[in-house]
Amino acid sequence: MDFGKYQRKLSRKVRRYKSLKGTAPSLEDLYRMCLDHIAPITAPVALISQIQRSGGSLLSQLFDGHPEIHAHPHELKIGYPKKYHWPKIDLNKRPERWFNILFENSVIRHFREGYQKERNADITFPFIFIPALQKRIFLHTLDTIDGLKLRDVFNAYMTSYFYAWLNNHNIEGPKKYVTAFTPRLSMSKENMGSFFEIYPDGRLISIIRDPKNWYPSALRHNQKIKKDKYADIHSAMNQWQECTLSTLENKERYGSRVCVIRFEDLVSKTEAVMRHLAKFLDLGFDPILLTPTFNKTPIGANTSFQLEKSTIMDSTLDRHKTLTQDELEIIVTITQKTYNRVAEKAIAF
C-alpha cells in the first residue's frame, strides 16, 4: 500500500470516528493517527559525497524509487552549522535541541514552491511535507526508546523525515539503506570518523569526475548562481585536488565500506555501474535504478548547460571542449597525477 492510500485510509478512520462522536476531524487527529502507524526507520545511511558537480544528484536520483531504499529526495542538509559539517549531537541536551540541529530548512521552501531540479527549471514536483508533524514524530520515536544511543537520534530523524513527507510514494516495505547526497561532507576526516562511528554498517559512495570535464560544469554553475568560487582556475583545481585526495584517504581508511566510481562510467555505462552498486548495498537489481526519478517520477538532468534530454546526458563527457588550450594544460599539470591515482582505486567497468 502506498502512502497516499495509507493517508486516505487514516482519513476515513478519523472521519468515521468523529462522525460517531459528533465532532469534526482536526489536524491533531491526523497527527495521532500517523503516530499510531509509524514503523521506525533503523536502516544505515549510504552516503554519496564528493566535490559538487560530480554526479551526486544524478546517482541520488537513480536510487530514488528502489523498493529496498529510503531515498532522500534532495541534498541531505542535516549538517551543522553548515551542510558539509557532520552534526554533533550532545546526548545531555534536550531532544528539541537535537531536532533544531538536524532540521532541514529546505523542506519549507520545497513544500511551498514544489521541488525543482534547479530554481529556473520548467517542471515542478509536489512535495507535501509537514514540519510540525516531523517534530512530533521525532520526539515520539525517541520517547519509545530506553537507553538512548547516538544512533537512535539519527534513526528518529530519518523516521520523522520520511513519514512527515506525506506524498512519499516509497514509504512501504522493508528497507536496507537510506541513500542521501551531501557534497563535500566526505572531505573531512572528522566528518567521516563521526559518520562511521554512528553508522558502522553505513556505506560511502564517492564519484570522481575527470577535472577537464568537471571544471567547465563547476564554473558555469557558479556563474549562473552569481558566485565566483571557481573563477580562478588554479584555486578551483586545488579544491578538486583536496577533495580527490580525501577520497583516496577514505578508501584506504574504511576499505570495503567505501566505493569509488567514475562519473564517466555512471553516465556511459549506467547499467553496469548500478548493478555493481546494487551488489555493494546488497540490493536486488530493479530497472528503476536506470532512470533518474523524483518520488518515482522521471526527472531531468541537473546541468549548467542547455538541457538536451530528460534522462542521462552523454554530452556531460565533452565539457572539456569548451576550454582553451591554456586551461587544459593548467588542469592536466595540476591534477593528472592525482586523477591517475584515484582512477586506479575506482571500480573498473
Image (cartoon, rainbow, N blue to C red):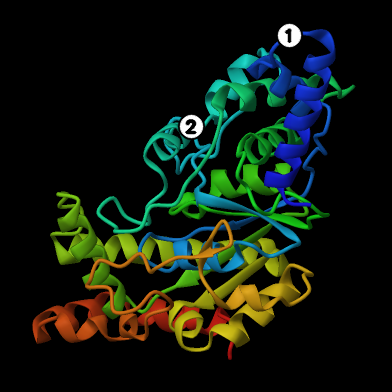
In the image, is 212 to the left or to the right of 146?
left
Give SS at disc 1.
loop
Q: Position of residue 181 (x, y in %)?
A: 52, 55
Asked where in the image residue 249 lies, by quadrant, the reply is bottom right
| Label 1 neighbour load within 10 Å: few <14, some 14-19, many 20+ | few
Vertical order, 100 against 264 (above or below):
above
Element marked by disc 2: loop
Number of marks present in the image shown = 2
Residue 245 visible (yes or no): no
According to the image, label 1 marks what residue?
Answer: 23
Q: Residue furthest top?
A: 22
Q: Dot 2 corresponds to which residue?
A: 80
What is the x, y in percent for residue 209? Answer: 40, 75
Q: Earlier in the sequence, mark 1 or mark 2?
A: 1
| Numbered badge on residue 98 | none
Q: Going 44% across and 52% down the picture, which residue do you hit?
A: 125
190 or 306, nearer to the observer: 306
Seen at 45% across and 77% down, the residue is: 263
Q: Residue furthest right?
A: 146
Quadrant assignment, res 218: bottom left
**Residue type at tag 1:** Thr
Q: Is residue 33 above or below residue 68?
A: above
Q: Is residue 313 visible?
A: yes
